[in-house]
Image: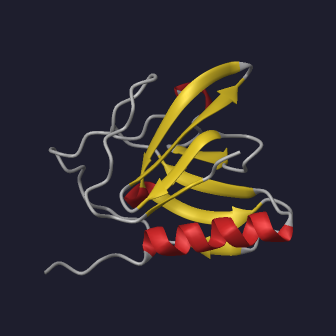
């Protein structure tokens, strides 16, 4: 049995801590071909995303993908981020959080982002997930 990564659990825990403390949770993401973010907001191959409840819609933090809808420059975008591309989660107000070691592994060829643009994402296969509901 393959060992389960602690990273998605730590991301969810820090997200909860930020929300409970009144802070704005932000993700630092290394963008690659599997990462779906607005390219105009990517700088040096990275993007910082506000994942607070007020800035996102249908936020899902599961063990392999982080997905949500958000507005960039007034335009709604569907965001999909493989958990392995998250470099950090931190509070915008004070910078406290966790930074993860970057992975220098090639993109897995068989891993595509879940469905986008209004299609219901496939339910995770017996993996726990956290969904923020307003």
Residue 68's image quarter? top right
Above or below, 33 relative to 94: above
Question: Residue 49 vs residue 63: left or right?
Answer: right
Q: Residue at x 68, y 55 (%)?
A: 26
Above or below, 25 relative to 48: below
Q: Tell me, what colour scheme is on the image? A: secondary structure
Q: Position of residue 29 (x, y in %)?
A: 53, 52
> Is residue 101 visible in this depiction of the protein?
no
Quadrant in the picture for the N terminus:
bottom left
Q: Position of residue 118 (x, y in %)?
A: 46, 23
Question: Camera-side residue: 79 or 62?
Answer: 62
Q: Residue at x 73, y 22 (%)?
A: 73
Q: Position of residue 35 (x, y in %)?
A: 41, 40
Q: Position of residue 20 (x, y in %)?
A: 79, 69
Question: Camera-side residue: 29 or 50?
Answer: 50
Question: Residue 89 vs residue 53: left or right?
Answer: left
> Is residue 53 visible in this depiction of the protein?
yes
Quadrant in the picture for the C terminus:
top right
How many marks the image carries: the answer is: 0
Q: Residue at x 40, y 28 (%)?
A: 116
Residue 97's image quarter? bottom right
Q: Residue at x 38, y 60 (%)?
A: 84
């Amino acid at each position: 049995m393959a060992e389960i990564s602690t990273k998605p659990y730590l991301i969810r825990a820090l997200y909860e801590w930020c929300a409970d403390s009144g802070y704005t949770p932000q993700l630092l993401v290394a963008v690659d071909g599997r990462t779906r973010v607005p390219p105009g907001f990517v700088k040096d191959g990275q993007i910082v995303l506000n994942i607070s409840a007020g800035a996102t819609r249908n936020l899902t933090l599961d063990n392999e993908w982080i997905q949500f809808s958000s507005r960039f420059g007034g335009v709604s975008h569907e965001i999909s981020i493989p958990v392995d591309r998250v470099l950090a989660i931190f509070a915008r107000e004070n910078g406290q959080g966790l930074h993860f070691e970057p992975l220098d592994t090639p993109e897995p060829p068989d891993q595509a982002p879940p469905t986008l643009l209004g299609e219901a994402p496939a339910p995770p296969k017996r993996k726990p997930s956290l969904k923020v509901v307003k």
